[in-house]
Amino acid sequence: MTQSPQTRAVLMLAQVMLALFILIPFFWMLSVSLKPATEPFAIPARLWPADPTLENYVTAFRPEFRTYFLNSMIVSGSTVVITVTLALLAAYSFARGTLLILSGLMALVVLAQMFPHSAIIIPIYKLMRAADLLNTYASLIIAYVSVTLPVAIWMLRGFLLKLPISLEEAAAIDGAGPLRIFFGIVVPLARPGIIATAVYVLIVTWQEFLFALSFTSTQDMRTLPVGLNDFIGQYGIRYGELMASSVMVSMPVIALFFFLQRYFVAGLTAGAVKG
């Protein structure tokens, strides 16, 4: 339908207002990170510092921060690899299988997405304690896989349903086996969906706080979200260093998302199809 100029103007204004509403907190975070220690509380308040400084970034980028960054990289990277691998295998079975039981299993996968993290953290914590895995990478990776796998399966199944099955049938007629069809045809064609799912899993695990706080007890095992608590003390909050650390934590994921956003949107759209 053709929109009138007035309608387009209203929609454009609404989009600009929404963008400002979303971006202002990030702008304020960046502004505070560049202010000297006393300026965040100056009256009148400034949207942008009078004398920007990188002192907060230098102070925040201490050895502990680098340890937290490494821990987040290990946990998030391992979770992405394991989740995407398992989800791709499961999603292919759900997308191509014809057994009635698969429909029931898919319903359980969808149902698993409805449970909040706070509802399952206690059972997972007890399992990790019984297995003597607390305060290890394994406990966080297992927990993150358990909460991201259902959504990853749902996203990849929706994407695989859009792939033409005729290509697989033609390869089978030519003598290709199931493994060759899967790795030679399905995986390359599903690359946008795989990337979208990987980005989603990375975003979720990179910023996750509750499991990381509950399953780790020593400083050398903390991830970045938990490590930011170092700037919140008993007698005050070091806002400049806290905001500088927040900027450094956010930038890798923001840059990755903008670089791969078309794949992420494609994967979400594909996951919305019926079937």
Image: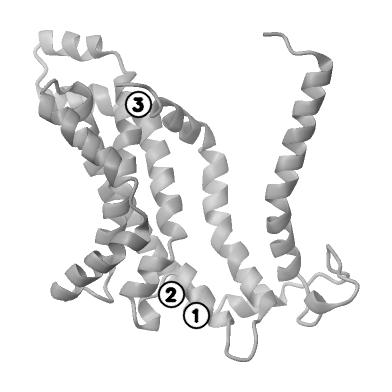
Q: Name the residue located 34 percent from the left edge and 81 percent from the top edge.
A: 217
Q: Earlier in the sequence, mark 1 or mark 3?
A: 1
Q: Is residue 269 above or below residue 217?
A: above
Question: Which numbered mark, 3 or 2, is in the foreground of this view?
Answer: 3
Task: Tell me whether the residue at label 2 lies in contact with that at label 1, contact meaning CB atoms closer than 8 angstroms.
Answer: yes
Callout 2: 10 Å neighbours few (<14), some, many (20+)? some
Q: Name the residue located 43 percent from the left edge and 44 percent from the top edge.
A: 199
* Of the pair 51 and 210, the residue shown nearer to us: 210
- Which quarter of the rendering shows the C terminus? top left
Q: Is residue 158 above or below residue 86?
A: above
According to the picture, the residue beneath numbered tag 2 turns out to be: 67
Task: Tell me whether the residue at label 1 lies in contact with that at label 3, contact meaning CB atoms closer than 8 angstroms.
Answer: no
User: Where is residue 46 shown, x and y percent of the image?
Assistant: 86, 67
Amino acid type at circle 3 is Phe
- Which quarter of the rendering shows the N terminus? top right
Amino acid type at circle 2 is Thr
User: Where is residue 108 shown, x and y percent of the image?
Assistant: 22, 40
Per the model, the C-alpha gap separating discs 3 and 2 is 37 Å
- Res 41 label: none
* Of the pair 176 and 273, the residue shown nearer to us: 273
According to the picture, the residue beneath numbered tag 1 turns out to be: 63
User: Where is residue 206 shown, x and y percent of the image?
Assistant: 44, 58
Q: Secondary structure at mark 2?
A: helix
According to the picture, the residue beneath numbered tag 3 turns out to be: 159
Q: Secondary structure at mark 1?
A: helix
Per the model, the C-alpha gap separating discs 2 and 1 is 6 Å
